[in-house]
Image (cartoon, rainbow, N blue to C red):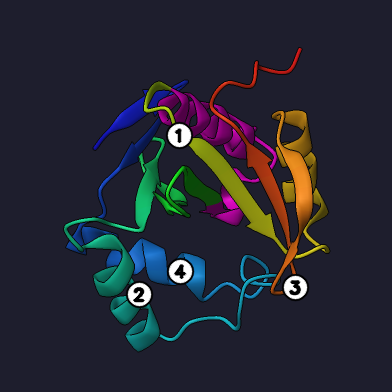
Amino acid sequence: MERKSAGLRARRMTEADLEPLHRLLSDPEVMRYLEPPFSREQTRAFLERAGLTPEPLILAVDDGGFAGYVIWHPYDDVSMELGWVLDRSRWGRGYSGELTRLLTDRARRQGRGVVIECVPEQTVTRHIAEKSGFRFCGMAEGCCVYRRQPDEKEPL
């Protein structure tokens, strides 16, 4: 699967993504709200388990280079889960909002809703979800859950 928008491309992971993925997942600032930084072995296991499978859980974000990854997989019977983990050098460029729009549009065309989960401290993620028309639906396992249904109109 490949989806493009404004110079961004969501594509399947490859073995060649191991090194930039490890730089991303070993960065303490990137991982601050997620989990402890990954070792090379943890990164390899994550790539194999989540990115190189027939039905991947994550897709690489490419802007001419490896910019990070998006979480994109079924959340439940009617919704996809969306998230993003981006290299710090790409922060502040609008990538998260653009990826949210791109993949929310894809889900809508498939008749599916979209869910974004994040810890309450992830104020930027919460802001992007709300700005993108997602509604706060409560907490699940310590995470804020935001949903957008396929029939909801784009925010103004």
Label 1 is placed on what type of residue? Arg
- Marks 4 and 3, Cα distance to the nearest angstrom? 27 Å
Q: Residue at point 80% right, 41% down?
A: 127
Counting from the top left corner in percent of width and height, residue 139 is at 76, 63
Q: Secondary structure at mark 4?
A: helix
User: Does 86 appear in magenta?
Assistant: yes
Q: Earlier in the sequence, mark 1 or mark 2?
A: 2
User: Does 147 appear in magenta?
Assistant: no
Q: Earlier in the sequence, mark 1 or mark 4?
A: 4
Counting from the top left corner in percent of width and height, residue 1 is at 24, 37
Q: How many marks?
A: 4
Q: Which residue is mark 1?
A: 112
Q: Where does the magenta region start and end?
A: 84-108
Q: Which residue is mark 4?
A: 23
Q: Which residue is mark 2?
A: 46
Q: Residue at point 82% right, 53% down?
A: 123
Residue toward you, 130 or 111: 111
Q: Is residue 115 left or right of residue 60?
A: right
Q: Is residue 22 left or right of residue 125?
A: left
**Predominant SS along the magenta part:** helix
Q: Is residue 6 above or below residue 139?
A: above
The residue carrying pointer 4 sits among few (fewer than 14), some (14 to 19) or many (20 or more) residues within 10 Å by Cα, namely: some
Q: Which residue is mark 3?
A: 142
Closer to viewer: mark 2 or mark 4: 2
